[in-house]
Image (tube, rainbow, N blue to C red):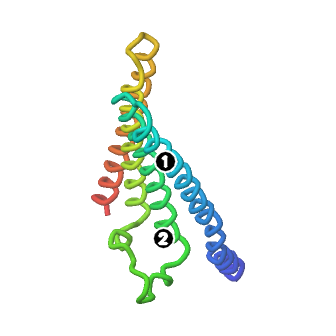
């Protein structure tokens, strides 16, 4: 039985490299976001130089670019930390590749917390964009209220993750 369990454990450990396909997919998504970002930046710059744009529309377009940037950063953190945590760390041992300092301190809890705060930031930008983009009709107020409640739920989730980790650390 010990030999079977050892074989299963070795198989599962060896399969960690299959996660690289997921992380490669995330890198492809980052390039897709980059393409969309460049396209939207070109359109905005073209409108700024050659067209007319209301101040509020400019703010909303800039918030959309910030939103794309934050989503790309979130995906990048997940991909890089995931490879470092779950696949391999040996590739960072080469002298020509500088490992980001924060990656030394990443564990699954820190990754969850970074993700939670990134989602809160993205949600906050989306809530602000939603608030700024509409005139305050009853329907728009309801939409803004729902977006605000969802944002607040993300904040509560991050607080819950932090609280649960603190409790876990205190009991050990």
Looking at the picture, does residue 135 appear above or below residue 86? above
Q: Classify the position of the N terminus by image quarter.
A: bottom right
Binning the other alpha carbons within 10 Å of mark 2 as few (below 14), some (14 to 19) or many (20 upward) gives: some
Q: Estimate the spatial distance between the alpha carbons at disc 1 and disc 2, rounded to whole Å.
A: 37 Å
Q: Residue furthest top?
A: 138
Q: Is residue 83 left or right of residue 160?
A: right
Residue located at (45% from left, 41% from top): 44
Which label belongs to residue 42? 1
Which label belongs to residue 32? none
Out of 97 and 9, give the one closest to the viewer. Answer: 97
Numbered disc 1: secondary structure:
helix
Residue 135 location, quadrant: top left
Q: Classify the position of the C terminus by image quarter.
A: bottom left
Give percent across and percent down for residue 52.
Answer: 41, 30
Give percent across and percent down for residue 155.
Answer: 35, 39
Out of 80 and 41, give the one closest to the viewer. Answer: 41
């Amino acid at each position: 039985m010990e030999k079977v369990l050892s074989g299963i454990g070795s198989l599962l450990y060896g399969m960690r490299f299959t996660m690289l396909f997921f992380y490669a997919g995330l890198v492809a998504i980052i390039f897709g976001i980059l393409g969309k970002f460049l396209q939207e930046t070109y359109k905005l710059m073209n409108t700024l130089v050659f067209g007319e744009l209301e101040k509020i529309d400019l703010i909303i377009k800039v918030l959309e670019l910030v939103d794309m940037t934050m989503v790309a950063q979130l995906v990048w953190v997940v991909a890089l930390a995931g490879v470092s945590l779950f696949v391999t760390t040996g590739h960072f041992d080469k002298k020509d590749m500088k490992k980001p300092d924060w990656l030394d301190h990443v564990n699954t809890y820190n990754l969850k917390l970074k993700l939670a705060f990134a989602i809160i930031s993205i949600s906050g930008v989306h809530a602000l964009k939603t608030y700024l983009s509409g005139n305050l009709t009853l329907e728009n107020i309801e939409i803004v209220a729902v977006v605000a409640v969802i944002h607040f739920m993300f904040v509560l989730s991050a607080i819950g993750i932090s609280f649960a980790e603190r409790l876990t650390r205190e009991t050990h």
